[in-house]
Image (tube, rainbow, N blue to C red):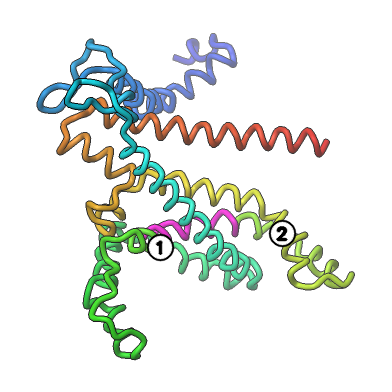
């Protein structure tokens, strides 16, 4: 065994050491994606599943067109509206998490070191319990006659018999904000924790007010964390399934719910896979556009 290892050159030793990780990535990530890619270009079996070997682009055409009674393809905007609603809710979630998460991260980063860990634990406490359990707790808060309605009625803020929050986009948005806020706070804090606060003191000494310090010193230095946080919130929010299903109901589907319906009730696995790859393509396009923009910005800066 020792002779075998000694006879290997350095690149082969590295490849041998990395082989368990490479096999795990191939089997756990690449292979399922390849299977779903093939499924998206295959025919649908009558009662679910895929007709392997019967290749077709019908699943991708179904995203924009449907057959009428004369077997003619006509434009269908239903799935585009679901994508539009998903992007709209995800953008609102990202913006809301940024507005709430940036001051929170700035507050934590500006505390003495001995208090920061305690505050970070408080931020990460929601991760200690299952998301499903936490969303059922929000159902108890938002439902008709729930805790929020009883409190507002007790304070005489509302007189209406019901706010009707449950099973609306508002309820879905509240759930998304709650679930993804820590994903915005932690990356921004990681950037602000390395901030040299002497720059802030110097800016104040030179006559800058609080807003100027925030806009010209703190936010530019926290930009990598802001970008990472926005990415960590926006992309998973697009494919969220549990929150729209429990808080939004069946009338306000998001992309994740649409994919689930195709693999279950609709028995149309190729279309479900095609929707997933359309979403994946849009996400990759967004990342590439950001990469190109950063390269151009770097070129101009240089």
- Residue 168, percent across and down? 30, 61
Residue 38 position (above or below residue 212): above
Q: Residue at x 33, y 84 (%)?
A: 158
Q: What is the distance, in whole Å, between disc 1 and disc 2 at their CAs?
A: 27 Å
Residue 276 position (above or below residue 197): above
- Residue 61, percent across and down? 32, 23
Tell me the quarter of the picture where residue 144 sits: bottom left
Q: Residue at x 34, y 37 (%)?
A: 77
For label 1, the SS is helix
Tell me the quarter of the picture where residue 281 sits: top left
Query: Which label number is shown at residue 295?
Result: none
Quadrant showing the C terminus: top right
In this rendering, would 177 be left or right of 67?
Answer: right
Viewer-closest of 18 and 128: 128
Q: Which residues are magenta?
A: 175-189
Q: Which residue appears farthest toward the front when viewing the image?
A: 70
Neighbourhood count class around disc 2 (C-alpha, 10 Å): few under 14, some 14–19, many 20 upward: some
Q: Residue at x 58, y 12 (%)?
A: 9
Q: Residue at x 27, y 41 (%)?
A: 258
Secondary structure mainly formed by the magenta segment: helix
Query: Which label number is shown at residue 195?
Result: 2
In this rendering, would 135 be left or right of 108?
Answer: left
- Residue 3, percent across and down? 50, 11
Q: Which residue appears farthest toward the right when viewing the image?
A: 206
Viewer-closest of 184 and 43: 43
Determine contact: label 1, label 2, CB under 8 Å.
no
Magenta stretch: residue 75 in it? no
Which label sits in the foreground, 1 or 2?
A: 1
- The residue labelled by disc 1 is 178
For label 2, the SS is loop
- Residue 268, percent across and down? 20, 29
């Amino acid at each position: 065994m020792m002779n075998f290892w000694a006879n290997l050159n350095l690149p082969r030793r590295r490849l041998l050491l990395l082989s368990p990780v490479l096999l795990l990535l191939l089997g756990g990530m690449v292979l399922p994606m390849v299977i779903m890619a093939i499924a998206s270009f295959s025919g649908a079996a009558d009662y679910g599943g895929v007709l392997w070997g019967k290749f077709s682009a019908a699943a991708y055409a179904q995203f924009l067109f449907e057959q009428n009674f004369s077997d003619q393809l006509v434009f269908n905007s239903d799935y585009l509206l679901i994508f539009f609603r998903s992007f709209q809710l995800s953008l609102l979630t990202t913006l809301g998490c940024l507005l709430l998460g940036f001051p929170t991260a700035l507050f934590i980063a500006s505390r003495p070191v001995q208090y920061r860990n305690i505050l970070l634990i408080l931020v990460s406490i929601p991760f200690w319990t299952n998301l499903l359990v936490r969303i059922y707790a929000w159902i108890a808060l938002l439902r008709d006659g729930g805790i929020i309605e009883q409190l507002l009625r007790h304070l005489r803020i509302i007189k209406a018999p019901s706010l009707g929050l449950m099973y609306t986009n508002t309820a879905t948005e509240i759930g998304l904000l709650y679930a993804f806020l820590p994903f915005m706070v932690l990356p921004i804090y990681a950037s602000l924790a390395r901030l040299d606060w002497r720059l802030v003191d110097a800016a104040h000494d030179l006559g800058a007010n609080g807003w100027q310090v925030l806009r010209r010193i703190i936010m530019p230095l926290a930009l990598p964390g802001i970008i990472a946080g926005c990415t960590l919130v926006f992309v998973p929010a697009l494919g969220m399934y549990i929150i729209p299903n429990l808080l939004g109901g069946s009338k306000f589907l998001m992309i994740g719910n649409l994919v689930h319906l195709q693999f279950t009730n609709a028995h149309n696995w190729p279309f479900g896979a095609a929707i997933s790859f359309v979403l994946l393509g849009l996400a990759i396009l967004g990342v590439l556009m950001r990469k190109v923009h950063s390269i151009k910005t770097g070129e101009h800066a240089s």
